[in-house]
Amino acid sequence: MAQADTRQSGSVYLSKQLQALQADASQNPAQLWVLRGQDLWQTQCASCHGELVTLKKAVARYPKLNAQGALVNLEDQLAHLAKQGARALLQDEVLALSAALYDAAKGEPIGTTVVQPYYDQGAQLWHTRMGRINLACVHCHEQKVGRQMRADTISQAHPTGFPIYRLSWQTIGSLERRLRACYSGVQAPLPPEGGTELRALELFLKVRAQGMPLEGASIRR
């Protein structure tokens, strides 16, 4: 008999009120970035890359190796493509495009491929104690799931709903921003934005969530 899949999205750990807010497209603040991203896509990208929905399978495979052999996530790829276009995009515009693409890929199973040694590096980081708090990711997101920490309920850390509108940020943010916030939370030195360490950890998390459906831009507390 096949073992039941007990993995759960971070949305499961939201309050009923926040779940309702997330489900209401007319009230969900993340939808502001989705709509902006859809407009940007039509004016800047669609003439070359087609409609958003045609890329849903490609979106579900990030992070992955680019043509130069570097591990990149979706936001990296969007920023790179924008530099080849009429103008460079602001970070907020990259996040809006990312939100629109992940919204178009909603329901698509995560299909990230294991890329070693990046995957091995990410797995090591997941299990390594760090910072003054001396905790590893695994201590919270596997051993203390469902418990309260600073008014948050600890989730399993499956990245199915990024980018996220986090109420404490009052804006939308990438998985990279959330990972750096975790480093800050355990009082560890912050890895540089766009660094290999963060991309390796993102790869590990996406492979760990292999087959789980993407949820589009989501709300988190």
Image (cartoon, rainbow, N blue to C red):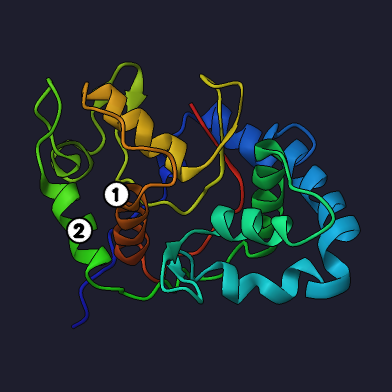
Any part of residue 215 in sight: no
N-terminal of the pair, mark 1 or mark 2, is: 2
Query: Mark on residue 121?
Result: 2
Residue 185 position in % (x across, y down)? 28, 23
Farthest residue, direction top: 150
Residue 179 position in % (x across, y down)? 36, 38
Residue 120 position in % (x across, y down)? 18, 64
Residue 208 position in % (x across, y down)? 29, 62
Q: Is residue 112 left or right of residue 186?
A: right
The residue sitting at 9% across, 27% down in the picture is: 134
Where does the N terminus fall, quadrant-wise? bottom left
In the foreground, 51 or 156: 51
In the foreground, 50 or 190: 190
The residue sitting at 30% across, 74% down in the picture is: 114
Any part of residue 128 in sight: yes
Give the total of numbered labels.
2
Looking at the rendered structure, the kind of residue marked 2 is Gln
Q: Is residue 45 left or right of residue 120?
A: right
The residue sitting at 30% across, 52% down in the picture is: 201
Farthest residue, direction bottom: 1
The answer to which image quadrant residue 47 occupies is: bottom right
Query: Mark on residue 210?
Result: none
The answer to which image quadrant residue 46 occupies is: bottom right
Looking at the rendered structure, the kind of residue marked 1 is Glu
Helix, strand or loop at label 1? It is: helix
Q: Is residue 52 left or right of residue 197?
A: right
Label 1 with label 2: CB-CB less than 8 Å: yes
Q: Residues within 10 Å of mark 2 (few under 14, many from 20)?
A: some
Q: Is residue 48 above or below residue 166?
A: below
- Distance (Cα) linking label 1 and label 2: 8 Å
Query: Mark on residue 197?
Result: 1
